[in-house]
Amino acid sequence: MTFTSQFSALGSDSKALEALLWTVFALGVLKATTFVLSFSSLVLDLFVLPGVNFRKYGAKKGQYCVITGASDGIGKEYASQLAKRGFNLILISRTQSKLVTLKSEFESKYDVKVRILAIDIAEDVSENYIKIQEACSGLPITILINNVGQSHSIPVPFLETEEHELRNIITINTTATLKITQLVAPLIVKSAKEARCKGLILTMGSFGGLLPTPYLATYSGSKAFLQSWSAALAGEMKSQNVDVEIVLSYLVTSAMSKIRRTSMMIPNPTQFVAATLKTVGRRSGAQERYATMTPYWSHALYHFVIENTIGVYSKLANSINYTMHKSIRSRALRKAARQAKQQ
Ligand SMILES: NC(=O)c1ccc[n+]([C@@H]2O[C@H](COP(=O)([O-])OP(=O)(O)OC[C@H]3O[C@@H](n4cnc5c(N)ncnc54)[C@H](OP(=O)(O)O)[C@@H]3O)[C@@H](O)[C@H]2O)c1
């Protein structure tokens, strides 16, 4: 006697139970199939499919990329690796001297043209946007990398976050990113049409925005904002032949993360950007999301596991994150106290 026929034998009331069991079974099969398909897609994206050919974005045809926060860390690597693929560059960041050094390095190493612009993006003033417009004026631009970002100097309770830190995070990560995109995106649409290629807008998101992150509340909120904004923009710009992607990253060694040593979970900017450019347009770890990519392999597996187990918005995820960042704050405060004593 089978499992279901045992219930049938119990009479007509058991029919409802039998139907319920079949429904649960069918849902289980559907869930398992979806899981297997999305994991297979992750493996294909990360390890099997060949790298994206940037000719589709106009590589080696005189096209320019605009990169914000381009003088250090991840932004500097985007600049270097896109120059290597044959794009001219417009580099925007704060420190003129760093930009001058990079300009001469990239022009001689990759034989590309480089324009530089030193502005403080935390100052949301019209002169900045006029300067960006002037820097881009008359140039064929097919790629924008919204990389510039600021986080909290150390994890901090929201109620103790200093006003200038809060304001800078919101201005740099959201207001300025949106305004720069409004300036550059129309140029990308025009240039891509003229060059008969596609345009690309990449924006740096973060696991800080993927998971609500206590003690980094303002940064977390700003990156979550970028996630929704970028995915919405992707829907709008699809018909204009422009790919728009938010790039999710866990930790990467840089001045911002204050981490110097790489590990399995923490790549350096060269490794992170290589993975991003190789898989542009593929979701990798972000299988459940449109126009979103988690490109570095260990970050991708981490994202996939969280999404398919406790979920990014769960109480458990929030509480693990809370404990972790509270402990990072305590250590940072102890270190600051030690340094103050030594002085
Ligand atoms: N590193 C990570 O672990 C990590 C993880 C997830 C997401 N992200 C995101 O990745 C992006 C890049 O981070 P990163 O770690 O590469 O940062 P980084 O090493 O600190 O580099 C930041 C870059 O942005 C520029 N910049 C900073 N503030 C600026 C301002 N007010 N005006 C103009 N330029 C400014 C800096 O210019 P100067 O050098 O001239 O100051 C530098 O070129 C950010 O959006 C960040 O949120 C990073």
Image (tube, rainbow, N blue to C red):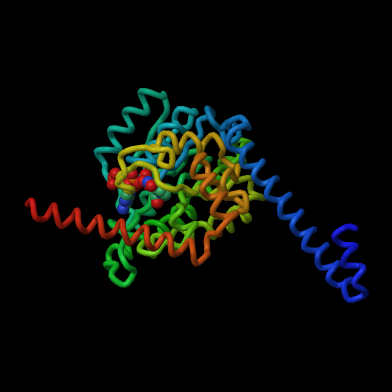
Q: Is residue 190 left or right of residue 180?
A: right
Tell me the residue at 14%/54% (across/down). Answer: 338
Depth check: 315 or 145 in front?
315
Instruction: Give the number of marks.
Output: 0
The image quarter in which residue 103 lies: top left
Residue shown at the point (37%, 28%) measured from the top left:
106
In the image, residue 195 sits, relative to residue 311, either above or below, namely above
Say whether residue 6 is visible: yes
Q: Quadrant of the N terminus?
A: bottom right
- Which residue is found at the position 39% from the left and 63% from the top? 322
* Image location of residue 240, percent across then percent down: 64, 48
113 or 23, nearer to the observer: 23
Instruction: Single out the residue that lies furthest toward the left.
Output: 343
Question: Which quadrant holds residue 109?
Answer: top left
- Of 279 and 125, the residue lying toward us: 279
Q: Can residue 133 be seen here? A: no
Left or right for 44, reference 259: right
Residue 71: % across, % down: 33, 40
Q: Residue at x 40, y 46 (%)?
A: 251
> Could you tell me residue 155's position as x and y percent?
31, 60
Q: Is residue 263 above or below residue 319?
A: above
Q: Position of residue 335 (x, y in %)?
A: 19, 53
Q: Residue furthest bottom?
A: 13
